[in-house]
Every structure is written in C-alpha cells, then in structure tokens.
Amino acid sequence: MRDLTDRALGTASVRGAGYADIRIVRRLDESIAIKTGRVEGVASGESEGFGVRVLVDGAWGFASSSRLEPAEIDRVAGDAVRIARASATALRRRVELDDRPPARGSYETPVDEDPFALSLETKIASLLEADKSAASVRGVGYTESTYAAQREWKTFAATDGSFTEQTFTHVGSAIEANAIKGDEHQRRSYPDAGGAWNAAGYEFIRGLDLAERAGSIAEESVALLSAPQCPSGQFTIILDPSQLYLQIHESCGHPSELDRVFGTEASYAGTSFLTTDKLDEAFRYGSDLVTIVADATAPGGMGTFGWDDEGVAAQAVPLVQDGIFIGYLSSRETAPRIGRRSGGAMRADGWNRIPLIRMTNINLLPRPGMSLAEIVADTDEGLYLASNRSWSIDDRRLNFQFATEVAYEIKAGQKGRLFKNPTYTGITYDFWRSCDAVGDESSYRMLGTPNCGKGEPGQIGHIGHGVSGARFRNVRVGVGDW
Amino acid sequence: MKARRSSGDGRRVPADWLAIAEETLSLARGEGATQAEALVMAEDAALTRFANSEIHQNVAETNASLNLRFVSGKRVGVASTSRLDRDGLRRVAERAGQIARNVAEGDEVIALPTPDRPIPDLLVAFAEATAEATPELRADGARAVIAAADSAGVTAYGSFATTVETTAVANTLGIRSAGQRTWSQLLTVSMGPDGGSGYAEISAVDAARIDPSAIGREASERARAAANPVAIEPGEWPVVLTEYAVSDILDMLGYLGFSALAVQEERSFVELGKRVGSDLVDIWDDGSDAHGLPMAFDYEGVPKERVQLIEAGICKGVVYDAQRAAKDGVRSTGHGLPAPNPWGPFPLNMLMGAGAASRDDLIGNLERGLLVTRFHYTNPVHPKLAIVTGMTRDGTFLIEGGKIVGPVKNLRYTQSYLDALGGVEAVGSERRCIKGFLGASVVPPVRIASWTFTGATEH
C-alpha cells in the first residue's frame, strides 16, 4: 500500500501541492431484508478506491477514483491539484491547518464474533425467526426486519509523514411491525426504527434478543390502532433512549459542528444557533444535569476510531458541561479560528468523499441518582415517549418537532395506557433547560445513527449516541388530531 | 439517453459497460444461475462548493460499480463490486450465487423483465457541455454567483455540480439497455447582514443553459427583501409557494404513495379514481420529457413509460417495476431501482402541469397570506394521510392587498400535502426543473387556499 500512497503524495507535491493526503478505502457490506416472513433481499457489496486531497496556495482540491492503479493515481493526484488551482480563483481566506504530530499506527474495532465469518444461513434464520414471530400476531399488516454489517479497511497517508491503517466493523438490526386499518397506519419497532447499531461483532446482534421482543412489539402496533389520540398541551415528558438519542443528534450534535457554525453547510442543511460568541459568553444550553461529550473513544460507538480522516488522534471533547456550552466538534482548519486545536472530528463517507466535521459519539452522560425506571416512578403525571417516528428541525437547529411511535400515560409513577400519534415540539435551549432528571449508569446504553446525512455531494455518516433516558418539564405535546 | 460509440480519449463508452454486464451474465450462468441481471452504473461527477463568498470545497469522482442479481429458481442473491476486472467479476458472481444458494426458497416467482418494447434514443438526455465541464467552468459559475451577491451586499453560499452517468443493463431474458445522461445543478443561498436569506436553484441536462449570474441575482434580491423579518402568529394561512416548495410536495407524494408497492401494502393514499386535488392539479411521470432530467430506461433496463399519476385532481395511476407488475398482472412502467429493492418502484421524473397564472397573478389575487420560497427538513408525521412537518426557509414574506409587504420569520408547519393539493386555487404558467431527493421534478408555483402553520422560530 505504501507504494501507492507515496506515489499519490509525490505526484501531488511535484504538481504544486503544499499539503496532500490520500485515503485508500475498501468497504464490505452485507444486508438482509425480510418482509412478512419472506426473505426480500440479501445483498453483499464490495467497493474500493482512493481519494486525494490537496492544498495549493491555501485552496482545497479533491479527486477520487475506483481504479486503484498507478496511472490512475497519477491522473487523480494531478486532477486534485488542478481543481485546487480553480478553487484559488475564488478564495478570500487562505486555509491554515493546525499543527499535530504525524499520525502513525493502527486501530481495529474489537470484535468477538466476526459477522462476515458467520454463515449467511445462520444470520437469515435468526432474523426470520424474529420476523415471523411479529408477523404471526393477529392484526399485523406487514413486518420488516433488517440486518446489516459493514467492514471498512482504511489507509491514510499525508505529506507530513502520517501513515495509519484502521479496520472498522459496524453491525445493526431491527424488527418492525405495521398495523393498518383504513387511514390509520401504526408502526412499532425494536430496538428502534433506525435499527440498533454498534461498532462490534455479531455478539451485539445476539444480545438484542430480537425474537424475544418481536411478539410484544407487534401486539402494540395492533393496539395502537384503537388507542386514543395522544392529548395536546403542556406536559412532563420522559424520553426513552430510543427517542432521546435522536434529540441529542439533531439539537446538540449538529449545531456543535464548527464548519456549520462558520457557514460551510449553509446551502444545504443550514447553519447553527451555537455561534462562537456563545462559547465566549458561557451560554446556558441546558439545565445543570446536562453534560454532553463528543467521545471518539467510547466502546461500541460507531464514532469510535484511532485517528480521524486528517490523522488527528481520537479524543473526548466536552460540548456541554453541567448545562454550559463549552466546546465544538472541529477540524484542523476550523479549530485554529477559535484558538483551539482540532478535536478530531473529520470523517469521510468512503473513498470518494472529502472528510467533513462529523459527530463522533455524542453522549449525554448519565447522572447518579435514579435509573430510568425510578424516574418514571418519581413522576406523578406525564407521558413516556418511545421510538422515533419522525423528525424535523429548523436551519439553525432551534425549532424542532419529533413524533414517536408510542406514548404511555404516566400516572402516580406508573406507566399506563397507550396513546397513538404523539408529537412534541420546542426550542432547543428551552427544552434542554427544562431537563430535571437524567437516568443513571444502569440505564445507559450506546445507540447509533447509521444514516446521518451531510454535505454536497451527499455523505452518510455512522454516529454513536450514549444515552440513558431523561425527563423534561412543561413541554408542548401535540400539533393536531388525526 | 445518448449511446456514444466512442469517446476518442480511451474512456469507456456505454457499449463497453454493456459488454462487462454481458460477461458477468456468462459468469453467473457458470455458477448455476437460472436467470441473472447485471447492472453497471458509472459516473464522472464533480461539484464545486462555495460559502462565505469563496470556494471552500471542490471535488471530483470517477466511479463505476456492477450489481448482479442472481436467480436460482425462487431464490435470489444480489452482490455488487467496484472491481470490474475479470477477477472482480468472477468474485461477484461467486458471492451472488453463494447468497442465492443460502436463501430459503420464496413463494413468489422472481420476475426479471423481458424486452417488449424499444428503448427510445433520448438525445435530449445528454449534453456535451456538461460532460466536458472543467473545474475552471464551475469556478467561473461560482464567481458569477458571488459577484451578484457582492453587488447586492450579501454573502453567497452554494454549489455547482456537473455529472455524467452511464447505465448499462443486461439480463438473461434478453434485456440489453445502455446509455448516458448528464445533469447539472446550480443552487445558492444568499445571506445578508440583517437576517435576510434568499434561495435560487436550477437543474438542467446542459450546463451551458444555466445562467449563474441570473441565479445569483435571484437569490441575492430575495435575501435583500427578506432583511429584518418580523414574527407572525402561526395558524391557517393562504400561501403562494414557489417552485422550490412545490418540488418538495411532489417528492414527498412520490415517496409516500405513487409506488405500486405502497398500494399493494395498503400504506399509500392512492386509490384509483379518488379525488386528492383540485381540478387544477395534473401530475405525471415522464422520463422522456426534455424539461426535466430525462432517463430512457430504469435500473432493470425497461424503457420508461409516461404514467399519469393525478389528472384534474383524480388519482389515475402508480408506477411499477417488474416484480410489482407481475403481482398485479400488468407490465412494468420502467420505474425499477437497483436490486435488492425492498422500497419498490419510484417516480424519478415527475412533472406538474402548468396553469395560466403569471407570478404577479398568484400574489396579486391574494388579499392576505404568505409567500413561501422553500421548505426545509420535511418529514412525514402520518404517511397515509401525507401529513408532513417542516420549516419555511430562505425567504418568507407577508402578502397584503395583493402585494408583498415585508419579510416574516420562519414558521413550522404540520400539513397534509393531499389537503394542500385539494386547496390549489391557481397554478403558475412557468415551470422550473428542480433536483430533489427523488430524481428531478418540473414544477410551477402555486397558490393554496390554506396551509397549517403550527410553530415559529427565532429567525
């Protein structure tokens, strides 16, 4: 591999690059989709290629190809330099990178049971059993069950002498039951609709106990058809981890991305209300109970690695400490602009995309005191919301609205009857300031988002979220009756 | 799609990719496939991105992959690879065969399509100017948008993309489809110092037909007009939606309901003959219409048919791929996606019929309402009723007495898109091609009697 990386970096330098890096990436994917007891699709994908990123006269250029051949490496490195020169014709601020020691070494996701070594037959049979269990419940219209695994081998080299080799393994699985009657369509899923994903081997899938949970999930989807509409008004709500992880993702993770703060995502997903003046003024993002960390070293998280795609070592960066906003997700280009060093959050979706600032594992740290069950027991009246169904947030990450698959009424510390079609809405910092309980370590688990979109051309990111559930007071619930 | 015979510079042309697909079929037969389909997707794509009125990201990609659907009786396996040499193709055939042998036999016959009609030679799908676009051309475009922003005292953000896509499909039942298409997209958000932002976008087959200065002026003027927005109360408001907002409605309806699979699974709002829009609403899918970004055939190699989805407000049809068509006893309309495809067919080339209203008519005949430039982060809340939530963005204005009287802060809505179609009371006479999350749509601006805004934000 060294000969290829040396060739790319050498060509880029000779053509005029002041800095260059190359990533050679090979990715293996496997997926199983089952619908209502029938194997709908089983697929295996293999992709490899390389991308060369260069700085010429303070301007970026990037080119990539799936043909991993010496002549193609020369062409692509040359194209990257030409592209950078074109960038330089519309440049107002030269790019300056922060210093970091050259990155050298290797990293591999810890895996107990290799998902790619396990027979396909075993994996299909296990998922089929869970799916059939859900589909056999009377009243269920259709079921969907999914399993996916991804392994990525990544070699990174840069003109400063960096050379790292990393291997990542991510797995995820979920079951979903759908009940339909007239215009009413209710869904229940487990562990959540996006699938539970971890950086791990097949041992993680076994631990989900999909077949055990399938029946009760399916029964709930049918029960929701005749459940009352979730009431509207101001409520105390408790968010199950299957919803809270996405609340963290949308309202803390994305607005903490420093490239977004500087406007470089403005033409796509927007900017951020967490402008740099809020860092200076110690902005109160949430209540004292809210501490959020971007931790690229967290076990099981899909945002865990050895080095990011700029060769910055993995680290834990506090974003919110005891409710006060104190840090960003950052890169070698953006961090120096606020007088800091890169927090190591640059990640690219495969060989054909540039690294962007992406969430690593954005974790709401557990608080000693009450487990999630004890928080429920501590609540006189309220709603317990679980499993995300819909999400939306404005282009500065302030006004959000989420829908969940189900709400359970809470009365006198007990979870009771089901409500259908729950939604809740708010303004990000008002919402987090209303948090008055966070679950303890016993309720804490690592979830993940395998489909986080960002950038143009589009990139899909694998993000981790450590979460234990939390309670919020005086939240607006309900926006309609259907 | 245009089938170029030779590029003259050593690059592969559609016939080369078709030969690779055929070679893979032969390898699949050797592995015991009773039927097989090989799909090659190749692209040369480039995108120049600008923010804070400078180019900050600038990328190019040369990519090709092969997707093999391997059928063994009622068993099917799918494997893909980006390694298109002989060894890579042999390995993909082995992997697909291994999957097929491990999958339990299904209860449905696997329906690969057969060649039952000719593929149109869509010359309008390809433009040399897009295929030959250089980094310098895209930088010129970015600079023109930035210059327009500078002139208006605002800052430019956006992207300029040019792409050549080559698709080749071969199957063991005789499908042989290959061709190239191009598309280009320029979009920009302008942001001013007083809280105003504006948007403009255009997509076209031919990059030479895109006028970056005009797009830059449109967004910049909108940003200037949107400065110092005031808060208004959410609630029911009549609205005029620009083409950008209307494209989201078509995309979402296509995603939720215009697929035969959605109907078969009873999760679609579509019932043939049911009224879902006002008389002014005509929506169809047509892969050959030169106003959009044409495609001659789908990812199963089936020529695309024009499918009327809504006519004068009445549901008229849905789109099919081979598998869903077999289930309903009809033929594929040419809307299949690459296998494996649990999502079903999708309309990727939707158009909405133009009306008679000028832009001035749409606003001039509204006593009090809102002009919405675009929607942001939309997501279904109740799929079967097509109830969607989202935000307004990049230029929302109050209309009073038939005139725009000033900008307002952005609002959240929770609105049935079907009710919105039912409330269409005027349709613009000019349409624009907008690239969305489901292909590209050609849409006019519209005026709608009522839109349900359910929240507000700070800007």
Image: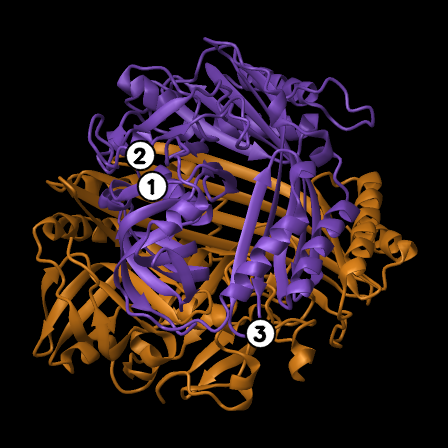
Chain colours: A orange, B purple
What secondary structure is marked by label 1?
strand
Say if residue A451 shows up in the picture. Answer: yes
Tag 1: residue type? Answer: Ala
In the displayed structure image, the side of residue B255 where residue B155 appears, left or right: right
Query: Which residue is identified by label 1?
Result: B426
Tag 2: residue type? Answer: Leu
Say if residue A191 shows up in the picture. Answer: no
Camera-side residue: B334 or A217?
B334
Image disc number at residue B193? 3
Residue A412 higher or lower than B281, as above or below: below
Residue B377 higher or lower than B33, as above or below: below
In the displayed structure image, the side of residue B76 where residue A257 appears, left or right: right
In the displayed structure image, the side of residue A274 where residue B143 appears, left or right: right
What secondary structure is marked by label 2?
loop
Please report the residue visible at 84 percent of the width from the left and 48 percent of the height from the top.
Answer: A78
Please report the residue visible at 38 percent of the width from the left and 54 percent of the height from the top.
Answer: B378
Q: Position of residue B134 (x, y in %)?
A: 77, 43
Q: Mark 2 or 1 closer to N-term?
A: 2
**What is the CA distance from the residue labelled 3 to the residue labelled 1?**
35 Å
Tag 3: residue type? Answer: Pro
State if disc 1 and disc 2 touch (CB < 8 Å).
Answer: yes
Count of number-bearing discs = 3
